[in-house]
Image (cartoon, rainbow, N blue to C red):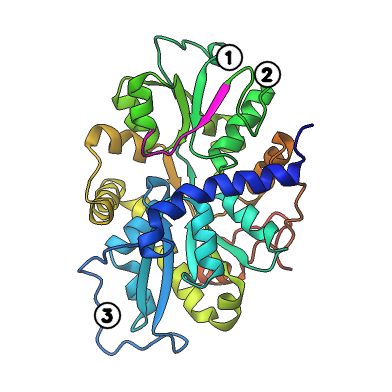
Amino acid sequence: MPANRSTLLRRGIAAMTALPLLTLAACSYGSEAKDDQTAKVAAGAKKIDGLDSVKIGYFGNLTHGTALVGVQKGYFQKSLGATKAQYQIFNAGPSEIEALNSKSIDIGWIGPSPAINGYTKSNGKNLRIIGGSASGGVKLVVNPKKIKSLKDVKGKTIATPQLGNTQDVAFLNWIADQGWKVDAESGKGDVSVVRTDNKVTPDAYKSGSIDGAWVPEPTASKLVAEGAKVLLDESSLWPDKKFVITNIIVRQDFLKEHPKAVEAVLKASVDTNKWINANPDAAKAAANKQLEADSGKALPANVLDPAWKSIQFTNDPLASTLSTEAEHAVKAGLLEKPDLKGIYDLTPLNKVLKAEGESPVDAAGLGTN
């Protein structure tokens, strides 16, 4: 008898959580990022909301480029004044959600699926999405010797990062749109979907154990550097070629108790995105420098350049696409139909945007008011 959707969701979350927690066990939920030495506190700066620090989480992915550049260029520390900006790096959404729930972090950059799961699992009580960060940066890349067209994907083995993660849901939905059948939990069917950590996906491709992957950057460009070809850019499937890949979330209690600190982080994010879009080459270099500081290894140009080019950095959370992504998860059998009303609180962001002379963003009916 097939498992019901609640069971699948629990299993998916367990599968997504197990490996990251093992790899991060030595440093609680995530590893500490190295602060850029240019992020100095201005003379005479004061603490915001009386806080000694604000704890910020992000992934070591280019789709989290706002956070990478903001750390590297000192935007967060500048905006927070004498309140220390502290950073933790995560490998997967579930571990970041756990860190948020345990108050190990206050604010985080994260993908839509873990934000939806975190919100629904807590019955809408643990987090809010307070801003956007990035769109795009996800591709289906394949072995051109085995797959020459989209119809050739049928019968092949394709990797996604994790059961139930944002890219996994997108690929399962695309498969369904082709009229093919795949069991969401096992990944077996007309296409074999294997869940492989992004760190090992290039090795799996080189060994021939997978024929391709639906993955975010820079993993997609790493595969291309190994001889794979881009068969489909996910942005081509969305209206205006935009869909949310990275959001900014905050603990609800932190938002309520420290609104000025939240506004300071959002101002830093807005300033960072403005600088990124005005200085794409310098921003790309800054993101890569922070990746090297955090992981010990920079990306080579043949990976960095195409990966960075495929990502759009935006303050808009693209809320309507979050609703669509949730519908895709329901359709795949990985999520009960969620009530996402109230998942967004864009009031602080719109306050910052107004002060900067920029247009407000919309919650697509999913805001707190």
Alpha carbon distance from label 2 to label 1: 8 Å
Q: Earlier in the sequence, mark 2 or mark 1?
A: 1
Q: Please report the residue visible at 52 percent of the width from the left and 16 percent of the height from the top.
A: 156
Residue closer to the observer: 1 or 54: 1
Residue 301 sits above or below residue 283 on the image:
above
Determine which residue is flagged by label 3.
Answer: 41
Alpha carbon distance from label 2 to label 3: 56 Å
Q: Where's residue 217, x and y in %?
A: 40, 39
The amino acid pointed to by label 3 is Val
Residue 66 within the segment the image draws in magenta = no
The single residue placed furthest to the front in the displayed view is: 1
Q: Is residue 56 visible?
A: yes
Instruction: Say whether marks 2 and 1 touch (CB < 8 Å).
Output: yes
Describe the element under mark 1 as helix, strand or loop: loop
Q: Where's residue 356, x and y in %?
A: 47, 68
The single residue placed furthest to the left in the displayed view is: 37
Instruction: Say whether marks 1 and 3 touch (CB < 8 Å).
Output: no
- The crowding category of the residue bearing disc 2, from other C-alpha atoms within 10 Å (few below 14, some 14 to 19, many at least 20), is some
Determine which residue is flagged by label 2.
Answer: 180
Nearer to us: label 2 or label 3: 2
Instruction: Say whether marks 2 and 3 touch (CB < 8 Å).
Output: no
Residue closer to the observer: 155 or 231: 155
Describe the element under mark 3 as helix, strand or loop: loop
Q: Quadrant of the N terminus?
A: top right
The amino acid pointed to by label 1 is Lys
Image check: 239 left or right of 67? Answer: right
Span of residues in magenta: 192-200
The amino acid pointed to by label 2 is Trp
Which disc is residue 231 wearing? Answer: none
Q: Please report the residue visible at 36 percent of the width from the left and 51 percent of the height from the top.
A: 60
